[in-house]
């Protein structure tokens, strides 16, 4: 006899999603997940449907970075899964927590056109695979997927068989797990040795990465920096963490300004909190070579990008920083004197230089000088914004000219080195964040690869999104290689369509910028916009630096 309280499995799973903290579900429906999405929407959940599965997963990645939470997407089986391999790899290499609710064909149905060994495909991407066992275990399986994604900071694929979706089960009363972990501070002999290094340092530097961006960690690091009189710097991914704090030197690495670069090079001890010390941060090791380097990580998870520090401490970031301060106080160690008047004056002069509007250099007819154009657009865009920068030779200039004021507002899309990952992540960020606009800056090649189709998603959901297309008519890195070898650059040229006209045809406001004078119209549109806006920025392919 049928139990009146029983409901189909797809409803059980949909009902569980809000309890797991899901505020936005991104996806593309097919026969293996459409009933789950339908039940989620009927229950009041917000669903953002994309036009390509890869962009649905990328949207979850963008949302995870912008909210510092777990991004969630859903797709059907077979070709839908093969379509998202690049996106899953991007999340795996970047340590981004994402849960993908992925349909699967029924076992034994070997003649199904979309039959695929999905476990092997997921394994190749670096994501974790969890098989949904049966109706009785499904809710537990889903909770496990979210737990592992959060704790291991990685993408997890929950494989959901299509033949189970209409089987009925009882609503489960599974206790919710705490989403916070209180770790102990680092301690022991290595901790004492690290504090000894700080005590003897005359030119210490404190560096913070993405693993140290919560409020408690930030405040504790600032207290320690003031205690030892050390300047502060961040990795690119932690950009904006110390905005407004005295002796904030900004980004450490290839994006360092000259004053910061000189001080970082002169440091005799670097204390890095939550930073992987990748080659981009250390300038291929030039900033750390021959120095005492103390690395503090919140857990023992490591990636191949890690440099080898002098000492590595594992412990809670905030608690470890405060423990170091207490030990220095107990030993009555004086400050280093590294935060002196010379550094203060240099940082002030550098800030004034960066605030000044750069002159426009001559470029080919119908184009504008890139950096000055971005500098002017930056002034017209609200300071509080999320920046999503796709990959291309334009990206370092974009990071410099469109800075963010807090780390969560930088959505990093370049963990796997593929162009075209920006539009999906921008959709995800814009749908998840409601108090500030999202700014996407992408190259024409990357936007052609995956952006045009998602303009319909941007329009349909009226996302608070500003899209700046760096339109130089070329694949930039390839153009550079041909140019450096004095070869014909024809193969790298794209001849893209009129992006502004395409956007307008899809009911999205757009402005074409082909001269410095056109920037006035673009800035006016930025100030008056009521919805998404596309700026087609025409650039000279011979005048863009890598």
Image (cartoon, grey):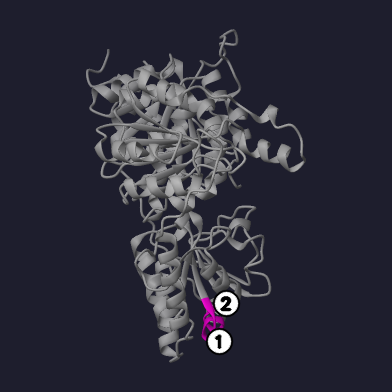
* Viewer-nearest residue: 31 or 282: 282
Compared with 342, 139 (above or below) is: above
Q: What element carries label 2?
A: strand
Residue 182: quadrant of the picture = bottom left
Residue 427: quadrant of the picture = top left
Cα separation, mark 1 vs mark 2, equals: 9 Å
In x, y percent, where is residue 90? 55, 39
Compared with 168, 342 (above or below) is: below
Rendered image: mark on residue 200? 1
Compared with 448, 412 (above or below) is: below
* Viewer-nearest residue: 427 or 502: 502
Neighbourhood count class around disc 2 (C-alpha, 10 Å): few under 14, some 14–19, many 20 upward: many
Q: Earlier in the sequence, mark 1 or mark 2?
A: 1
In x, y percent, where is residue 314? 52, 66
Residue 468: quadrant of the picture = top left
Determine the main secondary structure of the stretch shown in magenta: helix
**Magenta extent:** 194-204
Residue found at x 42% / y 80%? 325
* Viewer-nearest residue: 151 or 250: 250
In x, y percent, where is residue 535? 40, 34
Q: Do tag 1 and tag 2 residues touch (Cβ < 8 Å)? A: yes
The quarter of the picture where the N terminus appears is top left
Q: Does the magenta stretch include residue 202?
A: yes
Q: Is mark 1 on a helix, strand or loop?
A: helix
Q: Is residue 109 left or right of residue 304?
A: left
In x, y percent, where is residue 336? 49, 86
Residue 144 in sight: no
Rendered image: mark on residue 269? 2
Q: Is residue 135 magenta?
A: no
């Amino acid at each position: 006899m049928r139990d009146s309280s029983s409901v189909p499995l797809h409803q059980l799973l949909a009902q569980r999603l809000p309890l797991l903290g899901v505020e936005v579900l991104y996806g593309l429906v097919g026969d293996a997940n459409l009933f789950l999405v339908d039940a989620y929407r009927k229950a009041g959940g917000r669903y953002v449907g994309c036009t390509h599965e890869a962009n649905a997963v990328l949207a979850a990645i963008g949302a995870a970075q912008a909210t510092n939470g777990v991004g969630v997407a859903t797709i059907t089986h077979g070709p839908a899964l093969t379509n998202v391999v690049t996106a899953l790899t991007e999340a795996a290499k970047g340590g981004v927590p994402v849960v993908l609710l992925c349909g699967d064909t029924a076992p034994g149905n070997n003649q199904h056109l979309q039959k695929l060994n999905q476990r092997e495909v997921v394994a190749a991407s670096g994501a974790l695979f969890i098989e949904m066992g049966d109706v009785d275990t499904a809710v537990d399986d889903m909770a496990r997927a979210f737990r592992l994604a959060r704790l291991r900071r990685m993408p997890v694929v929950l494989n959901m068989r299509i033949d189970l979706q209409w089987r009925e089960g009882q609503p489960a009363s599974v206790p919710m797990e705490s989403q916070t972990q209180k770790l102990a501070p680092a301690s022991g002999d290595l901790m004492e040795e690290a504090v000894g290094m700080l005590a003897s340092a005359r030119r210490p530097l404190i560096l913070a990465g993405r693993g140290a961006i919560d409020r408690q960690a930030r405040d504790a690091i600032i207290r320690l920096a003031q205690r030892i009189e050390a300047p502060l710097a961040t990795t690119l991914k932690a950009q904006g963490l110390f905005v407004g704090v005295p002796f904030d030197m900004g980004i450490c690495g290839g994006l360092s300004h000259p004053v910061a670069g000189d001080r970082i090079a002169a440091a005799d001890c670097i204390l890095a909190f939550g930073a992987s010390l990748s080659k981009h941060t250390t300038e291929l090791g030039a900033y750390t070579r021959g120095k005492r380097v103390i690395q503090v990580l919140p857990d023992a998870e490591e990636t191949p990008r890690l440099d080898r520090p002098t000492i590595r401490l594992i412990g809670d970031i905030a608690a470890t920083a405060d423990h170091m301060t207490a030990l220095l106080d107990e030993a009555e160690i004086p400050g280093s004197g590294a935060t002196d008047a010379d550094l203060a004056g240099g940082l002030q002069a550098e800030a004034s230089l960066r605030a000044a509007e750069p002159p426009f250099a001559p470029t080919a007819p119908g184009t504008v000088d890139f950096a000055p154009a971005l500098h002017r657009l930056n002034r017209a865009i609200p300071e509080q914004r999320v920046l999503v920068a796709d990959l291309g030779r334009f990206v370092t200039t974009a990071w410099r000219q469109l800075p963010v004021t807090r780390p969560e507002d930088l959505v990093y899309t370049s963990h796997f080195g593929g162009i075209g990952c920006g539009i999906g992540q921008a959709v995800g960020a814009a749908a998840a964040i409601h108090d500030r606009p999202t700014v996407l800056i992408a190259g024409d090649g990357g936007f052609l690869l995956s952006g045009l189709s998602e303009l319909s998603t941007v329009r349909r959901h009226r996302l608070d999104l500003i899209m700046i297309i760096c339109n130089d008519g070329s694949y930039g890195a390839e153009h550079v290689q041909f140019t450096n070898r004095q070869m014909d650059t024809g193969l790298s040229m794209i001849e893209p369509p009129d992006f502004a006209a395409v956007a307008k045809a899809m009911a999205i406001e757009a402005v074409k910028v082909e001269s410095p004078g056109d920037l006035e119209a673009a800035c006016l549109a930025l100030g008056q916009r009521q919805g998404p806006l596309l700026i087609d920025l025409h650039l000279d392919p011979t005048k863009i630096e890598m």
